[in-house]
Image (cartoon, rainbow, N blue to C red):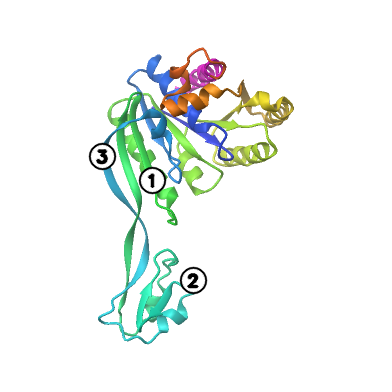
Amino acid sequence: MKQLVILSGKGGTGKTSVTAAFAHLAARGGLTGQVILADADVDAANLELVLQPHLLEEQDFKGGKVAVIDPDSCSECGLCETVCRFDAIHCADGLYSVDPIACDGCAACVYQCPSESITMREQVAGKFYFSESRYGPLYHANLYPGHENSGKLVTLVKQRARLQALDENRELVIVDGPPGIGCPVISAVSGADLALVVAEPTVSGAHDLRRALETLQHFGVRALVTVNKADIFPAGADEIEAFCHEQGVETIGRIPFDLTVASAMVAGEAVTAFQPQAPSSIAIRRVWMRVSALLLEKA
């Protein structure tokens, strides 16, 4: 079983569109019935918008703990408000309460409360989902705004996808990773056999591509790069490819700007299924052929 993770240094490069196309090409090619899909971009998951899956399972994801004050035993001494460094505790009409968004979960108020009226309780930080898509099982999740532990939620998504792949002897897990280089990305690349970074030929795209490649190098994951919307700024695409060559990173094709991609997203389809002969579809198919060949080499 192999794990392919698709990343981008920044948002908006077309990472999810490429992932959806890969899911379609794998399911309609030599990997029919052998692919598990995982959307690890839990802060802004949207792979399901393209794949239109049927929801099979939903469960709460519990993140960090927040302080809760029992008003019946509270002595209203105000010490908790004094020791809170995050201004999360407030008093209104003589009653003290905790703002769960502002609370950092440090528990300083718990230790200082003389009447032991404050406890730490787990909070529901998001939702975890298991669905069946037209191209295979899909694991995805949604982290609620203002909540932490997105790395743990990514780990849950990937673990469930990996376990099903192992249990059913499936050959490939395709992971739509999060943008950037933070904890969610680290969780997404953990255990990956290969990473494809989708870049765009802009100043910010090239800058964030460098950081994404540094992250993959740090964790020992082989990286490939493809440049999306490359014809918008060919000189920028040239610079990206030159940089990758200097770093010993293989670039595996340019994907042109193509309004068909937007039309496919509106229709809830992978662009390679929506219009197989569109310029973007042809380019993505070539990229997939190179990626799948490298995965087979690593088998």
Identify the residue under disc 1. Answer: 142
**Is residue 286 one of those drawn in magenta?**
yes
Check disc 3 and report its element: helix, strand or loop.
strand
Identify whether 294 is placed above or below 159: above
Count all numbered tags in the image, as a single digit: 3
Question: Sequence-wise, which precedes: disc 2 or disc 1?
Answer: 2
Task: Name above or below for residue 114 compared with residue 10.
Answer: below
Q: Secondary structure at mark 1?
A: strand
- Say if mark 2 contacts mark 3, CB within 8 Å: no
The residue at the point 55 percent across, 24 percent down is: 259
Q: Using residue 28 as the reference point, say whether residue 231 is left or right of it.
A: right
Q: Quadrant of the N terminus?
A: top left
Taking 68 as reference, is 26 above or below it?
A: above
Asked if residue 35 lies in the magenta stretch, the reply is no
Give the residue type that dot 1 points to. Asn
- Residue at 38 percent across and 78 percent down: it is 111
Instruction: Classify 149 as above or below 86.
Output: above
**Marks 2 and 3, Cα distance to the nearest angstrom?**
36 Å
Rendered residue at 31%/86% (across/down) = 75
Name the element at disc 2: loop
Q: Main secondary structure of the magenta part?
A: helix
Highlighted magenta segment, given as a residue range? 281-299
How far apart are the two marked residues, 1 and 3, measured between alpha carbons? 13 Å
For badge 2, the amino acid type reads Phe
For the point 37% across and 43% down, the residue is 141
